[in-house]
Amino acid sequence: MPRLIDLSLPLEHGQATFPFDPKLSIVTHNTTTSIGYNITQISMSTHQGTHLDAPRHFFDDGTPVDEIPLERFFGEAVLVDLAPGSALEPKQPITREMFQVHAEHFHPGAKIVYRTGWDRAFGRPEYYSDFPSLSLEAAEWIAARRIGLLGMDTPTPGTQWKEIHHALLGAGIEIVVVEAMANLELLPTRFTLAAFPLRIKGRDGSPIRAVAIIEP
Amino acid sequence: MPRLIDLSLPLEHGQATFPFDPKLSIVTHNTTTSIGYNITQISMSTHQGTHLDAPRHFFDDGTPVDEIPLERFFGEAVLVDLAPGSALEPKQPITREMFQVHAEHFHPGAKIVYRTGWDRAFGRPEYYSDFPSLSLEAAEWIAARRIGLLGMDTPTPGTQWKEIHHALLGAGIEIVVVEAMANLELLPTRFTLAAFPLRIKGRDGSPIRAVAIIEP
C-alpha cells in the first residue's frame, strides 16, 4: 500500500484570497432536520486555496482546464527544496540561480514542485502579500526548460504576476501551475503527484486536492 | 506511463441537480480585459455532478469529508458491470442477486464501482428521476460486506435514498459513496481509482474528479 501525503490547504468559510477575487463562502443549505440530509453550498473562485491555473487564466485563446490531458496532472514529480530544514524569508526573491543548481530535474514535461516553507503563514493576512517571490528571470528560465507542471507553496509565484504567468502559461509553453500547496517538507525528492482539477468546462482553473503518493 | 481514464461528468453553468439542492452557477468574475486575467466564481452543491458522500451527509455525528483518511479515496478498485455491453433499463431495480454473483470482490475495505450505463442519460431531465435503482436489500448486503468505497454511474444509489444512505454511511460502516460517475464502460475489471475530495472542513461531501489509472 502506498503512503499518501496531503499537499492541500483546508477550505473554510470566510477564508482570505487575493483582494479582487471571489470570496470563499461555505453555507449550510439543508440539514438532517430540514430535509433528511446535510448538504452545503460552496461558492468559490476557481483559484481559491490549493488550485491550478490553466493557460486560459491569462490567455483568452489558451487551453481551458477541462481540455488539458489528465496525464499533465498525474505522475512522477520532483521536489526542489529551496530551504531544506528551514524556510525562505518573507518577500525573499527567488532567483534563477536557486533553480539552476537543480537543472538536472528540469527536462521537457517534468513535474517540478518547489518548496519555500511559506505555507506556515497560511491563515495570516501576510500570506497573500509577503510571500517569497519568483523573479521573472527565474520564471523565464523555467519556461525555457519546457517542463510540464510547476507547483509551489506560495499563493502565486511572484509579485510580477502578469509577466510571470505570461511566461509560464504562454503559447507553446502551457505549463500547468499549481499554487498554494502545503506540507512540502514531508516530501521525498521523488514522488508521484496527483493534482486533478474539477472538470469545469471552458474555464481558467480549478481548486484541487493535491496529494503525493509514495510507493513503499 | 499509466493510461488515465476520466470517470467524471463535466460541470457547466445551469446544469441540473436534485430539485431541493443548490444549483450550479459558473460565472465570469474578471477577465483579461477587466483586470488582466480570467477568473471564475463557481457556486455549487457539495453533491453536484460526480461527487462523494461523507458519513456527515446523513449523520450529524458522522465523519466529515476532510477527516476521512486519504487512503479511502485511492487504490485498487474493481468494476462490477451489471450490464456488460449494454445498459440497465430506466428505473430498473438493482437486486441483491445482481451483486451476489460478484461476491468474491466484496471483501472488507474493497473499492467497488458498479456500472449500469445510466450516464448515457446525463443532460436529460430523466437523469435525476428514472435511474436504475439499488434495492435496500442490495444496499444492506453491500454494507454487511464492510467494503470501503462504493461508486456508481447513477446520481444517487436508489429511490429509497434515506434508508440506503443510512445503511451505507451508518456508524461502524462508513462506506465512501461516489455518485454520478461516467465512462465506466471503458474500465477493465481491475484498476486504480483516484477520487480525492476537496479539503472542505467539517462538511458532508465534495465534488471530485474521479480518474482511473491503468498500469501498462
Image (cartoon, coloured by chain):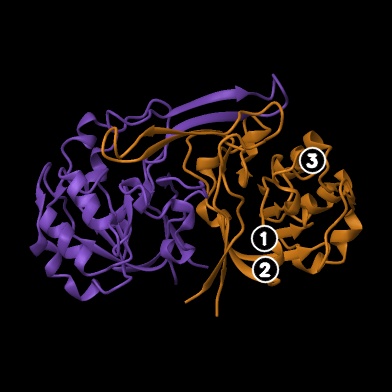
Chain colours: A orange, B purple
Q: Which mark is residue A126?
A: 3
**Is disc 2 surrounded by few (<14), some (14 to 19) or many (20+) residues within 10 Å?**
some
At a point 43% along the width and 46% down the height, the residue shown is B206
Under mark 3, the amino acid is: Glu
Q: CA distance from mark 1 to mark 2?
A: 8 Å
Q: Chain of mark 3?
A: A
Rendered residue at 50%/48% (across/down): B198
Q: Cβ–Cβ below 8 Å for labels 1 and 2?
A: yes
Image depth: mark 1 or mark 3 in front: 3
Q: Chain of mark 1?
A: A
Q: Is residue B216 left or right of residue A214?
A: left
Visible residue check, residue B53: no
Mark 3 and mark 2 lie on one chain; the one further toward the N terminus is: 3
Tell me if residue B58 comes above or below residue B112 in the rendering.
above
Q: Are marks 3 and 2 in contact (CB under 8 Å)?
A: no
Can marks 3 and 2 be said to lie on one chain? yes
Amino acid type at mark 1: Asn
Q: Quadrant of the image for the C terminus of chain A?
A: bottom right
Q: Please provide percent x and percent y for residue A202.
A: 51, 33
